Image: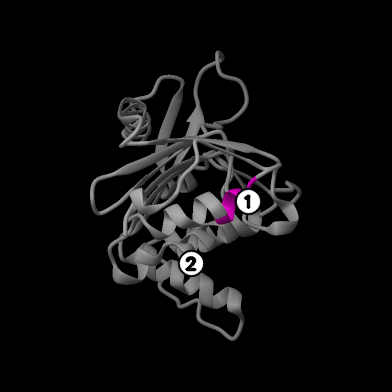
């Protein structure tokens, strides 16, 4: 089954839809590639994506994520271990959290998750990176793009009130292709007003900001 098999709406909104259950999870389970820009990223969010991304277990799926440069201290420590070639210890342990993080480690080591950091570089753009686009692709080369939500808020207790506009390659090809190009230009560091770095380069060169006080709910 592919993305065209999902009954997708043109818009999802928190007051009338369960955006996670009705949009994100079905698309994740029907795709093999997911490109995403978010303003913040947590370990819990990344772990939830991997659990919902059925094709990861078959070694087929690919996730490319671009995020802003602010992290919670605990998340940053774990991301650094996940993406560092120098860290070789196992996360396995008696807690469910350890199991989820170990699964993430295996997927990262298999080259299926890549993470980049976007940092604004112009006085014309205030504050931090907050691009809000995502693209799913499947085995049939079909794609679903969306805009509007700032981040995946998977926790039932802490989801944002938000809306998502959805575009498909079979109904709105030109717009989907434009979103794909926008993401690829970001990934290749060809976008004006922002610099995009590999996560470990940004971490090793002290380009990241982190705090234990930021309330970034999952």
- Check disc 2 and report its element: helix, strand or loop: helix
Return the mark for residue 51.
2
Horizontal side of 106 relative to 166 (left or right) equals left
Residue 26, position in %: x, y?
46, 56
Label 2 to label 1: alpha-carbon separation:
18 Å
For image coordinates 50% across by 81% down, the residue present is 92
The answer to which of marks 2 and 1 sits earlier in the sequence is: 1
Image quarter of the N terminus = bottom left
Circle 2 or circle 1, nearest the eye: 1
Judging depth in this view, the residue of 188 and 178 nearest the camera is 178
Q: Is residue 104 above or below residue 70?
A: below
Judging depth in this view, the residue of 27 and 58 nearest the camera is 27
Q: Is residue 119 above or below residue 215?
A: above
For image coordinates 35% across by 54% down, the residue present is 31
For image coordinates 57% across by 56% down, the residue present is 21
Q: Which residues are magenta?
A: 17-21
Label 1: how many Cα within 10 Å (few below 14, some 14–19, many 20+): few
Q: Does residue 42 appear anywhere in the picture?
A: no
Return the residue at label 1: 18
Q: What secondary structure prevails in the magenta region?
A: helix
Q: Does residue 82 appear anywhere in the picture?
A: yes
For image coordinates 50% across by 76% down, the residue present is 91
Please check the rendered image and state whether residue 20 is part of the magenta-colored stretch, yes or no: yes
């Amino acid at each position: 089954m592919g993305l065209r098999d999902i009954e997708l709406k043109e818009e999802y909104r928190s007051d009338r839809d369960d955006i996670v259950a009705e949009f994100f999870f079905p698309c994740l389970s029907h795709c093999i590639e997911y490109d995403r820009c978010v303003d913040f990223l947590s370990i819990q969010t990344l772990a939830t994506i991997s659990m919902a991304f059925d094709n990861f277990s078959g070694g087929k799926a690919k996730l490319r994520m671009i995020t802003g440069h602010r992290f919670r201290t605990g998340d940053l420590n774990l991301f650094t271990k996940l993406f560092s070639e120098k860290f070789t210890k196992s996360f396995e342990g008696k807690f469910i959290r350890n199991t989820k993080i170990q699964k993430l480690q295996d997927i990262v080591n298999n080259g299926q998750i890549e993470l980049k950091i976007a940092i604004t570089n112009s006085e014309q753009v205030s504050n931090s990176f907050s691009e809000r686009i995502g693209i799913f692709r499947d085995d049939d080369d079909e794609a679903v793009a969306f805009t509007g939500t700032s981040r995946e808020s998977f926790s039932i207790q802490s989801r944002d009130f938000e809306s998502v506009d959805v575009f498909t390659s079979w109904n709105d090809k030109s717009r989907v292709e434009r979103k794909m190009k926008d993401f690829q230009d970001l990934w290749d560091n060809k976008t004006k007003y922002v610099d995009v770095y590999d996560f470990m380069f940004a971490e090793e060169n002290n380009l990241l900001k982190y705090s234990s006080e930021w309330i970034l709910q999952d």
